Every structure is written in structure tokens, then in C-alpha cells.
Image: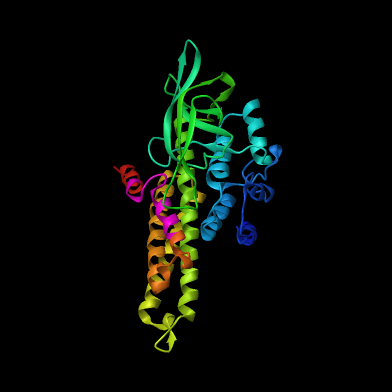
Amino acid sequence: MSEFSELHDELRSVAADLLAKDTVDWPLLVSAGWVGLEASEAVGGAGATFAEVAVICEELGRAAAATGYLGGAVLAIGALNAVQSNDSRDALLQSVVAGTTRGALVLPGAGQPAPFDLATTRLGWRVHGCAAFVPDAAGAQRLLLPARDADGVAVLVDVAAESPGLTVTEQPVLDETRRLATVTAEGIEVDEDAVWHLDGDPDSGLDALTDRAALAVACDSLGVAQAMLDTTVSYTGVRQQFGRPIGSFQAVKHACADMLVQISVARQLVGAAIASPDPRAVSMAKAYATEAAVDVAGKAMQLHGGIGYTWESGLHVYLKRAALNRSLYGSPAEHRARISARYR
């Protein structure tokens, strides 16, 4: 366990240094090896696990970095790993890892996990449906559409971004660090090689992809919260009031202590969810971590006083990111309802 802790600490340090750059574009993420972290070594990946991806997700949240990592790497690679191996899938996975192709899993940020239908007509196979709040679909060259075939079986359909009938419309949101889009399929024609079946039980596999997205967002929120606490502790240590640092006042100490407790609990829940595939653990992590991040960011703005509400402080960037994370892939209320339903 200590060996992995050292590995994660080193990965976290490297990630922090890389994200401190002004511009972190997609080629930089590819060259750093982050895109292919979970891909097998046979296709040029690192053969790592989601635990390592979680470290990157947390650091992205800590830096409030505007990258396409969530949709283009975390979700796309996870989806490609989840389907049965075939020539077209293997070629796309290798291309995504190498950075020559950008993919995206069209998993809606809210709603059903399989928003598309795969129908068989006299003209061939056609895909219909619509998904909203899809991360990083805009700019992707290949889109993986979660769909159900005529028998109701969950599959992934591989389509090119320029396919006739496919429309990707960017959705402006409050958080300017993320790119979300609505993806609409109006009778996209596909062939048999583009329809991929999930390993194991199809519905369980699709649910696992949604849980993966929710957990990645929880990791991001953990980074957001940690950044807000670190910034606040630093600021209150130098901001003077009545001749002494405001961090010496009991009310400020208590507020910072409350933030630390929330982050500590969130870190434990996120760590438990990473270690266990249990959907209940994921829901507990997503519900608590994303809600805590909003609360911590709000307290950080208050403790910064008037400057916390200015554009120059940059705190609003974290608050907006935390607010969007809270709603993506299920609100805290939805995840708590999911947890309670398992005990009925």
C-alpha cells in the first residue's frame, strides 16, 4: 500500500507542476501519458487503474483546469475498455491513446444512461436519440453513443463526428472551465462493425460507466475543495485586521476547521469508492464530495471578504465548477435516494 501511496504522491506532484502552466492543451495531456493511463500496454497505454486516473482528476479540480480530460480520456477510454475486443475497437483505442483521434462517450450529464435507440430498417441500421450536457463532445472526432437495440440490449455505437444526421451543439453553462454539448442523432446510418457489445451484463456495464463518470466528478470536487481551503488558510494568515492576522480570530479558525472536516470526510468516501466497485460507495462519495465542495467554496469567498467577490480573486471559477459538478451525473438528492432504495 505504501508503494502505491508513493506512486500517487509522485504522480500528484508531476500533475501539479504540469497544470501550473498557462495553457494545458490536448497534445500536452497525451504526451504526459494521462490519456492512456488505463489503456493496456499493448495499445500504447500505461496499464494503470482508475486509482491513478482519480489522482489526475483531483489535480484538475485543484487547478480548475479547462481541459477535455473528463470526456476525452476518463469516459472515452473507460468505455473502450468496457466493450468486447474487436478490430475496429482496438484500432480506435490505439488511436485515442496516441492522440491522433479524440473520442468522447456521449453519456448525458443527467437522465437515462442509454439515450439512443438502434433500429433496424429496410435501409439498414439507424440511430436516433438525444443526449444533453455531454462533456467534451464538441471537438471529438469519434463519438460513442450508448444505445439499445431492437431487443433492448445496451450497446455502444461508434460514429464519426461528421456523420450525416449527427448534430453536436455546445451548451453554454455557468462554469467556463468545462465544455458541454447536446448530441442529437437523427437516423444516423451505421454498419455492423460500428455496433459494439459490452463485456459481461450489458446493463451492469452501462451503469458502471455512469458510476465511473460520477466518481470522476467527485474526485474533481475534492480537488476544488482542497484548493479553496489552501487558499483560504494562506489568505487569512496574511490579511491583517485590528493589528493581527484574521486567521487568529476564533470564528475564522472554526470556519477553516469545518472546511477541513468536510474535506477529510469527502476524501475518505472518495477513497472507499475508488477501492470498491459498490454503487452505494460511489453514490455516497458523489453526494457528499460535490455538496461539500460547494459549501467549502462558499465559505472561502466569505472568509476572503470583499475581495473574494471580485473577478481578480478567481474564487468564482471554483464555485461555479463546484456547482456544476454537484449536478452532473446525479444530484446529491438523487444519489441519496439511490442509496436508500438499496436498503428497502
144 vs 178: above or below: above
Q: Residue at x 44, y 87 (%)?
A: 244
Q: Is residue 141 left or right of residue 276?
A: right
Q: Residue at x 71, y 37 (%)?
A: 42
Q: Quadrant of the N terminus?
A: bottom right
Q: Position of residue 274 (x, y in %)?
A: 51, 50
98 vs 53: above or below: above
Q: Position of residue 238 (x, y in %)?
A: 49, 81
88 vs 122: above or below: below
Examine the rendering and report whether any part of residue 4 can be seen: yes
Q: The magenta stretch spans which residues? A: 318-334
Q: Quadrant of the C terminus?
A: top left
Q: Residue at x 53, y 30 (%)?
A: 198
Q: Position of residue 233 (x, y in %)?
A: 47, 74
Q: Residue at x 38, y 77 (%)?
A: 252
Q: Closer to the camera, 144 or 36?
A: 144
User: Among all residues in the image, which is located at the extreme bottom?
Assistant: 243
73 vs 228: above or below: above
Q: How many marks?
A: 0
Q: Position of residue 290 (x, y in %)?
A: 41, 55
Is 282 inside the magenta-drawn segment?
Answer: no
Q: Closer to the camera, 259 or 321?
A: 321
Q: Residue 86 is drawn in which quadrant?
A: top right
